[in-house]
C-alpha cells in the first residue's frame, strides 16, 4: 500500500477530505455471524476520483449505500469534512452534499427526464416549473456533455441514456461527493469513455467522486486512488500511479481463469437435445424459413455464441417449454417435446439456468429454502406429494448453500430479493444441477460470479459432462464459450451460421460469424 | 315525459354523484401514492354517523361536515401509519375498517335508542341553493371544484409529481430525498378527509338521517370509479355522475306511476350497480396503475 504523503500533480491542489468512513461494519441482523463489511476505512477528497474495486459480493455497493444514507450501519463512524454525522435516509445524505447514482436505475419510467429531475427538487409544493428545469437540463447536458433530451419519457430511452439521466438528476442537488455504483454496467465501451471524461471534469471542479467497478480497465482509465475490497474486507488503498494492474488483480481476485479447460473426448453418441428447423413463435417474420437446427450430444458441451437479440432467448424459451414453436420440432432424449408444457420438460430432466435470474430464476419474495426446492417440492423426499418435509428441505438447502459457497443469512428467513446476483446464481446452479440432469440449458451461467466461483462452476460442468449430461451453453462472453465448449455454434438472426470444434477455435472466425458473415466452412 | 322530470332526474343524479366522486378523488390521491384503501365504505358509514351526531349536537351543518371529515382523517391516519411505518397489509386493514364500521354504527344506533334510523334536525341540515327549476346542495359545486383542484394538484404541481413518484417507484423517490412513508400517510389522511366529507354529506345533507345501510355500497362504487377513471379525478367526476344518473333514474322510475307496476322497484334499484360493473369491466386492462400500488416500501 502506498504512503499517502507521496505527491502527485493532481492531488497537491485540492485535498480536503470531504467524506470519511472509519471502521464501518455491517452485518445481517440476528442469525448470521458473517459481516458483509468488516471495519472499512475509506475516504474521498475534493478533486479526486477514488475507485472502489472488488468482485461481486465484495461489499462495494453496501458501503456506498451506507455512505449515502440509504442503508444503516452496524458499527463505525461517518465524517463529512471532519465532522461526525449520522444519516438515516438518502435525504439526509443529500443535505450533507452526498449523492449516489445507484446501479439499478432509480427512475420513474412513466415520467419524462425533466419530471424525474423535478421530483427531487426542493421546491414549494404548489409550484411547477417544468420549463425552467428543462432549460437548466439543456444547460447541464451541454456543460458536462451528457447528451439527453429532457422532454423524452424515460421508458423510451436506451440504458445508456437512462444512466445519464441518473447522473443529471443528482447533479441538480449540487453534491460535493458523488458515489457511482457500477455506472458503466449498462454502457458500451464508447459511452463509458465519455462518462470518464465527465467524471474527470467534475473532479476538476472540486467534487469528490467515488467510482465503483469490478473492471480493471476502468480503474486505470479514470481514478486517482483505488481501494480494493474482497468479501467485505479491506485489501488496501493506494494511488493509481503507484500500483500495477498485476498487483490489483492479485489483490482483487486472488487467481485467474484458464483459457481452455482440458477434457477427454465426448464418450456418448446419443442425442440429448435435437432441434429441427425450429422457428419460435413470434419470430415468424424475422427468422429465415429453414429455421434453426442443431443437435447436442450426451456428455457434450455445446457453446452457442452470438450477439444478444439474435433469437437466443426465444430458442431457450422453446426448448424449455416456455414458448410454443411456430414451426419445427424439438426432440429431447429422442422424444418429441414440441409444444409440451414446462413441467413436462422439467420432469424429463431439462435443467434451465436462465439469463434473467431474478425474474425467471427465482421467486424473489420467497425464502432461500423455498427457492431451492422450487422444482423438486412435489416429490419425495421433499414432500409426500401433499405436505412439505421441512427437515429434508432444510438439509438439502444447507448442502447446496455449502457446496456452492452461497452467502445467505438464513434459509427460512431470508427473502431472495436481498441476495446479491452472484449468490442468487449460486443457488440456481445448485438447484438445477444437483440431480445431474441429462440436459442443461445454461444462459450466462457464471455472470456475476467471482473468479473462484467461475472456476468451480466450470469444473462442475465438466464433471456433469463426464456423467453424460448434455450442456447447451449460451453466452455473449466468448471467453467462457471458448474455455468450456466441445463444439461452438454461432447463432445469427435465429439460425446457426457456423459450427466449429471448441479446442483451437478461431476467435476472429467466430466474431465474423457473429457479425452476420457466412462461411462455406459452416458445418454442423 | 315533462321537462320537470328531466330536471328532477338531473338534480337527483347530481346529488347522487357527490359522495361517489368525493370518495373516488380521495382514493385517487392515495392510490397515486401507492396506497389502496378498500375501507372507503367503512369511512363513509362512520363519518355519516359522526357527521349526523356533530350536526345535531352543535345545531350546525358545517360542524357536522367537519366532524365527518375529522373522522375520515383519523381513520386515514391510522390506515396510513399501519401500512407504511408498520408495514401492514393494506387489504386486511381496509377490510378491518369496513367490518368495524358495520358493527360500530349498528351498535351506536341501538344505543341511541333508534335502531336502524336516526334523523338529523331540519335546521342542522345543509341549506339547498334554490335554482328556479329545483334546488341543489352547495356540495355539488364543491365536488366539481375539488375534482378539478385534485386533477391540478396531481398533474400540475411539484407535490403531485412527488406523490406519483412515491407510487411508481418509492425507491427512486427515497433516493431523491422524498420522505416516502410520511408522504403516503399524508395522502391517506387527505383521502380519509374526502371520504369523511362524502359520508357526512349523506346524513347531514342528502338524506337528513343516518341508517346503518345509508352508504348502500357507495364506498365500493367509488373504488370501482377509481379503476374506471384510471386515477384521473376528472374522469372520476364523470364516473360519479354516471352512477348518480342511474341511481337517480332508478329512484324516479320506482316512484313514477304506471311504470312502477310493470317493473318491480327492486329490479330498477339494481341498475346502478350493474352499470358500474359493466363500465369497470370494460375499463380493466386498459388502465395503468402505479407500479408500487399496494406494496409497503422497505429500504433494505
Image (spheres, rainbow, N blue to C red):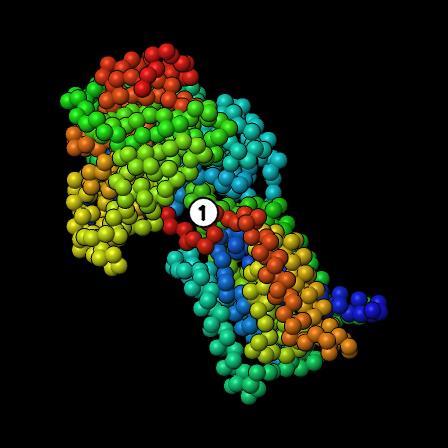
Measured as percent of width and height from the top left, residue A229 is found at: 24, 32
> SS at mark 1?
helix
In-image side of B208 versus A14 (left or right): right
Front residue of this view, candidates A206 and A67:
A67
- What is the quadrant of the C terminus of chain A in the image? top left
Q: Residue furthest bottom?
A: B113
In this figure, which residue is indicated by the disc labeled 1?
Answer: B170
Residue depicted at x 46% and y 25%: A289
What is the chain identity of the residue bearing mark 1? B
Residue nearer the viewer, A381 or B134:
A381
Q: Position of residue B71 (x, y in %)?
A: 53, 69
Q: Is residue B240 left or right of residue B128?
A: left
State which quadrant residue A17 falls in: top left
Nearest the viewer among B115 and A106 is B115
Neighbor class of circle 1 (other Cα within 10 Å; few <14, some 14-19, many 20+) is many
Is residue B39 in view?
Answer: yes
Residue A60 seen from this side: no
Q: Residue at x 43, y 30 (%)?
A: A279
Left or right of A346 on screen, residue B73:
right
Residue toward you, B164 or A459: A459
In the image, residue B278 above or below residue A224? below
Identify which residue is drawn at 21% across, 20% down. Answer: A260
Residue B153 coordinates in the image, percent (x, y): 61, 50
Q: Classify residue A295 by image quadrant.
A: top left
Q: Is residue A402 above or below residue B194?
A: above
Q: Position of residue B118 (x, y in %)?
A: 60, 82
Establish if A6 lies above or below B88. Answer: above
Amino acid at each position: 500500500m502506498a504512503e499517502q504523503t507521496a505527491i502527485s500533480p493532481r492531488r497537491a491542489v485540492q485535498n480536503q477530505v470531504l467524506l470519511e468512513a472509519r471502521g464501518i461494519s455491517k452485518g445481517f441482523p440476528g442469525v448470521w455471524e458473517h459481516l458483509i463489511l468488516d471495519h472499512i476505512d475509506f475516504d474521498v477528497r475534493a478533486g479526486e476520483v477514488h475507485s472502489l474495486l472488488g468482485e461481486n459480493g465484495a461489499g462495494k455497493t453496501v458501503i456506498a449505500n451506507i455512505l449515502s444514507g440509504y442503508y444503516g450501519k452496524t458499527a463505525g463512524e461517518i465524517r463529512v469534512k471532519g465532522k461526525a454525522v449520522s444519516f438515516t435516509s438518502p435525504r439526509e445524505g443529500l443535505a450533507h452534499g452526498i449523492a449516489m447514482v445507484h446501479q439499478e436505475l432509480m427512475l420513474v419510467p412513466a415520467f419524462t427526464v425533466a419530471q424525474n429531475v423535478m421530483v427531487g427538487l426542493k421546491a414549494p409544493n404548489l409550484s411547477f416549473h417544468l420549463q425552467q428545469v428543462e432549460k437548466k437540463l439543456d444547460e447541464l447536458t451541454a456543460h458536462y456533455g451528457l447528451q439527453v433530451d429532457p422532454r423524452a419519457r424515460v421508458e423510451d430511452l436506451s440504458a445508456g441514456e437512462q444512466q445519464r439521466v441518473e447522473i443529471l438528476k443528482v447533479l441538480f442537488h449540487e453534491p460535493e461527493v458523488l458515489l457511482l455504483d457500477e455506472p458503466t454496467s449498462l454502457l458500451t465501451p464508447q459511452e463509458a469513455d465519455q462518462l470518464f471524461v465527465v467524471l474527470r471534469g467534475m473532479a476538476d471542479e472540486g467534487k469528490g467522486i467515488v467510482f465503483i467497478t469490478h473492471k480493471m480497465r476502468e480503474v486505470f482509465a479514470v481514478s486517482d486512488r483505488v481501494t480494493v475490497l474482497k468479501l467485505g474486507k479491506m485489501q488496501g488503498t493506494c494511488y493509481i500511479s503507484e500500483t500495477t494492474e498485476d498487483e490489483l488483480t492479485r489483490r482483487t481476485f486472488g487467481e485467474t481463469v484458464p483459457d481452455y479447460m482440458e477434457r477427454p473426448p465426448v464418450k456418448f453418441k446419443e442425442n440429448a437435445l435435437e432441434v429441427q428447423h425450429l422457428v419460435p413463435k413470434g419470430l415468424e417474420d424475422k427468422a429465415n424459413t429453414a429455421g434453426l437446427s442443431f443437435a447436442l450430444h450426451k456428455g457434450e458441451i455445446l457453446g452457442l455464441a452470438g450477439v444478444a437479440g439474435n433469437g437466443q432467448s426465444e430458442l431457450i424459451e422453446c426448448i424449455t417449454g416456455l414458448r410454443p414453436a411456430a414451426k419445427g420440432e424439438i426432440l429431447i432424449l429422442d422424444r418429441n417435446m414440441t409444444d409440451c408444457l414446462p413441467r413436462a420438460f422439467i420432469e424429463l430432466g431439462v435443467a434451465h439456468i436462465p439469463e434473467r435470474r431474478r425474474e425467471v430464476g427465482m421467486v424473489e419474495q420467497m425464502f432461500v429454502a423455498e427457492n431451492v426446492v422450487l422444482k423438486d417440492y412435489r416429490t419425495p423426499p421433499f414432500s409426500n406429494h401433499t405436505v412439505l418435509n421441512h427437515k429434508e428441505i432444510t438439509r438439502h438447502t444447507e448442502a447446496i448453500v455449502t457446496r456452492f459457497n452461497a452467502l445467505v443469512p438464513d434459509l427460512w428467513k431470508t427473502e431472495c430479493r436481498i441476495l446479491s446476483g452472484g449468490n442468487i446464481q449460486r443457488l440456481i446452479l445448485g438447484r438445477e444441477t444437483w440431480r445431474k440432469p441429462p440436459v442443461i440449458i445454461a444462459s450466462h451461467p457464471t455472470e456475476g460470479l467471482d473468479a473462484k466461483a467461475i472456476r468451480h462452476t466450470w469444473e462442475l460442468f465438466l464433471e456433469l459432462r463426464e456423467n453424460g449430461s448434455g450442456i447447451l451453453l449460451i453466452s455473449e462472453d466468448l471467453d467462457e464459450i471458448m474455455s468450456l465448449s466441445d463444439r461452438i455454434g454461432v447463432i445469427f438472426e435465429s439460425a446457426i451460421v457456423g459450427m466449429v470444434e471448441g479446442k483451437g477455435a478461431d476467435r476472429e472466425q467466430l466474431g465474423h460469424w457473429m457479425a452476420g458473415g457466412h462461411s462455406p466452412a459452416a458445418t454442423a | 315525459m315533462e321537462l320537470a322530470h328531466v330536471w328532477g332526474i338531473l338534480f337527483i343524479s347530481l346529488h347522487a354523484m357527490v359522495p361517489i366522486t368525493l370518495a373516488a378523488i380521495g382514493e385517487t390521491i392515495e392510490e397515486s401514492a401507492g396506497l389502496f384503501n378498500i375501507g372507503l365504505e367503512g369511512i363513509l358509514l362512520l363519518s355519516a354517523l359522526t357527521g349526523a351526531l356533530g350536526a345535531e349536537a352543535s345545531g350546525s351543518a358545517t360542524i357536522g361536515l367537519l366532524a365527518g371529515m375529522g373522522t375520515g382523517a383519523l381513520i386515514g391516519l391510522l390506515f396510513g401509519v399501519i401500512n407504511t411505518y408498520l408495514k401492514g397489509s393494506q387489504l386486511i386493514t381496509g377490510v378491518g375498517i369496513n367490518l368495524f364500521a358495520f358493527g360500530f354504527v349498528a351498535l351506536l344506533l341501538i344505543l341511541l335508542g333508534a335502531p336502524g334510523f336516526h334523523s338529523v334536525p331540519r335546521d342542522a341540515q345543509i341549506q339547498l341553493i334554490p335554482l328556479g327549476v329545483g334546488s341543489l346542495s352547495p356540495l355539488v359545486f364543491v365536488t366539481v371544484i375539488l375534482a378539478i383542484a385534485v386533477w391540478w394538484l396531481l398533474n400540475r404541481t411539484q407535490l403531485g409529481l412527488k406523490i406519483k413518484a412515491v407510487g411508481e417507484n418509492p425507491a427512486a423517490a427515497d433516493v431523491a430525498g422524498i420522505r416516502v412513508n410520511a408522504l403516503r400517510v399524508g395522502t391517506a389522511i387527505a383521502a380519509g378527509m374526502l371520504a369523511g366529507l362524502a359520508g357526512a354529506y349523506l346524513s347531514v345533507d342528502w338524506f337528513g338521517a343516518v341508517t346503518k345501510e345509508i352508504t348502500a355500497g357507495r364506498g365500493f362504487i367509488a373504488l370501482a370509479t377509481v379503476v374506471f377513471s384510471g386515477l384521473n379525478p376528472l374522469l372520476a367526476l364523470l364516473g360519479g355522475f354516471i352512477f348518480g344518473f342511474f341511481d337517480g333514474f332508478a329512484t324516479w322510475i320506482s316512484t313514477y306511476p304506471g311504470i312502477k307496476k310493470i317493473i318491480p322497484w327492486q329490479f330498477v334499484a339494481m341498475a346502478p350497480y350493474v352499470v358500474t360493473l359493466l363500465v369497470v369491466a370494460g375499463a380493466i386492462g386498459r388502465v395503468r396503475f402505479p407500479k408500487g400500488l399496494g406494496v409497503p416500501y422497505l429500504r433494505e
